[in-house]
């Protein structure tokens, strides 16, 4: 069997934003101290943005990186083979939210055709040259579009690049979602969700229904869908106000899985073509509190959902079509609180908030933590940046540190 590999991971949760890497022939268990460390690097800064990898480079966003001389926010670039810093570009002031644990940048960069796009927590959309780090265009989503955040923790979205179109979520009742020409910043369309409470933390995903491209997103008001060509609002799935809406939706064919934390829950929505070019939404099952997921994310493998229970070190496996929980188990290896998750080759890579990284079988019949290790020097702040798997390598970002592990057989 030929090994399958992804060569790039250009945005949050990968090219298709599923959190699932196509890699095969990976280790089925690790040595006691974890897989082989290929390299370790510093300079990512304070924050929770994940890593984006394109070509021979890695990109992330962080406050006060050890490679800079001040505490401001920087977009940083590293060599993929060695982890050595290549450049860093100041993107603005640091994000200080008032609580030490929650300070720091959180938007994972998106790379397309030599440009790195990122949104700062303050709401500034920035494009930089991927080769040199030269600062390009910047748009203040609040000033330009009346953007509003649905909570106090800053913008976290990774922009969607769809051909020559850049789509993002200023949030609020003026411009909930906007599509721009990514080369010159001109507005293609704007979409308003009436009485929207403000942007959440999710990133836009693409769905197709009857050969029609649809952008699906969530904000503090719930989920909604937009016609990709015209910006027409197609449907909404409103929820009661909650502390924050964070996880990125999951798409399977005409289905949308929406989930939020803070005891809110998960729901399944089906999209159906209607008269006059409309798309109607049908609730397959409403919000189920037992499926709540705060910010670690959920992955769909075959017909089962995997993620942590809200922000607890309890992993849940549930049936997609019913929302019924098949099993739920607490970490047996010392994982604490919220868990970020990525999947590959029949396994879940679960990164607990305290820096424990566990290898778990993606098996709907039972929960089994096969192996685990402690990410070096982790634990001072929450370990929230989502893991990345590309070309047989596992990349982790914990604060200022980036690690690269070889997980190939």
Image (spheres, rainbow, N blue to C red):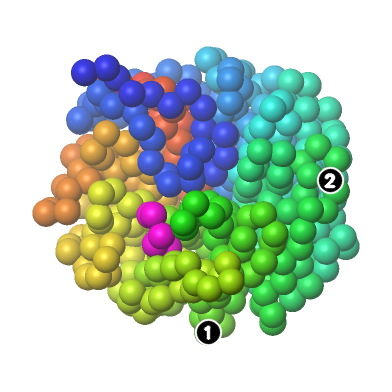
Q: Are marks 2 and 1 in contact (CB under 8 Å)?
A: no
Q: What residue range appears in magenta?
A: 252-256
177 to the left or right of 329 = right
Q: Is 50 placed left or right of 285 in the picture?
A: right
Q: Is residue 339 above or below residue 98?
A: above
Give residue 222's position: percent from left, percent from top: 54, 73
Q: Residues within 10 Å of mark 1 (few under 14, many from 20)?
A: few
User: Quadrant of the image for the N terminus?
Assistant: top left
Outermost residue, front side:
276
Residue at left offset 51%, top offset 27%: 8
Image quarter of residue 229: bottom right
Task: Using a 10 Å C-alpha cutoff, classify the residue at mark 2 as few (fewer than 14 neighbours), some (14 to 19) or many (20 or more).
Answer: some
Q: Position of residue 13 (x, y in %)?
A: 48, 44
Give the quarter of the image for residue 4: top left
Nearer the camera: disc 2 or disc 1: 2
Task: Say which mark, if any, is on residue 240.
Answer: 1
Q: Residue placed at 27% from the left, 69% from the top?
A: 323
Pick whichever of labels 2 and 1 is earlier in the sequence: 2
- Look at the numbered disc 1 and give the secondary structure of its residue: loop
Q: Label 2 to label 1, Cα distance in Å? A: 34 Å
Q: Is residue 136 above or below residue 312?
A: above
Q: Image quadrant for the C terminus?
A: top left
Q: Residue at x 20, y 60 (%)?
A: 329
Identify residue for label 2: 185
On the rendered structure, is 68 left or right of 254?
right
Q: Nearer the viewer, residue 47 or 151?
A: 151
Question: For the residue labelled by badge 2, is the local secondary structure a helix, a strand or a loop?
Answer: loop
- Left or right for 303, reference 119: left
């Amino acid at each position: 069997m030929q090994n399958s590999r992804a060569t790039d991971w250009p945005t949050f949760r990968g090219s298709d934003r599923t959190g699932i890497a196509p890699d095969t022939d990976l280790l089925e268990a690790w040595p006691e101290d974890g897989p082989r460390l290929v390299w370790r690097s510093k300079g990512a800064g304070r924050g929770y943005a994940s890593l984006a990898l394109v070509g021979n480079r890695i990109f992330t966003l962080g406050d006060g990186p050890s490679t800079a001389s001040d505490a401001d926010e920087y977009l940083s670039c590293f060599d993929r083979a060695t982890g050595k810093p290549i450049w860093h570009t100041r993107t603005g002031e640091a994000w200080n939210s008032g609580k030490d644990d929650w300070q720091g940048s959180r938007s994972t960069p998106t790379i397309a055709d030599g440009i790195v796009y990122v949104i700062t927590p303050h709401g500034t959309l920035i494009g930089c040259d991927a080769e040199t780090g030269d600062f390009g265009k910047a748009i203040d989503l609040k000033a330009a579009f009346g953007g509003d955040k649905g909570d106090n923790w800053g913008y976290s979205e990774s922009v969607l690049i769809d051909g020559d179109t850049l789509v993002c979520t200023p949030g609020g009742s003026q411009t909930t979602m906007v599509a721009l020409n990514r080369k010159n910043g001109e507005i293609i369309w704007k979409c308003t969700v009436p009485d929207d409470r403000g942007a959440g933390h999710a990133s836009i995903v693409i769905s197709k229904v009857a050969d029609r491209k649809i952008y699906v997103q969530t904000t503090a008001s719930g989920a909604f869908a937009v016609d990709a060509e015209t910006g027409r609002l197609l449907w909404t799935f409103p929820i009661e106000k909650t502390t924050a809406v964070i996880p990125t939706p999951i798409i399977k064919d005409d289905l949308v899985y929406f989930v939020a934390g803070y005891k809110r829950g998960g729901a399944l929505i089906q999209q159906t073509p209607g008269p006059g070019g409309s798309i109607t939404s049908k609730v397959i099952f409403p919000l189920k509190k037992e499926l709540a997921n705060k910010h670690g994310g959920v992955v769909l493998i075959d017909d089962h959902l995997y993620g942590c229970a809200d922000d607890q070190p309890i992993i849940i496996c549930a049936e997609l079509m019913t929302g019924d929980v098949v099993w739920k188990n607490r970490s047996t290896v010392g994982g604490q609180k919220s868990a970020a998750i990525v999947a590959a080759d029949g396994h879940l890579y679960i990164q607990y908030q305290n820096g424990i990284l566990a290898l778990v079988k993606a098996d709907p019949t039972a929960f089994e933590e096969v192996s685990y290790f402690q990410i070096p020097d982790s634990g001072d702040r929450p370990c929230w940046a989502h893991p990345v798997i590309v070309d047989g390598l596992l990349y982790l970002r914990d604060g200022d540190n980036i690690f690269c592990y070889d997980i190939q057989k």
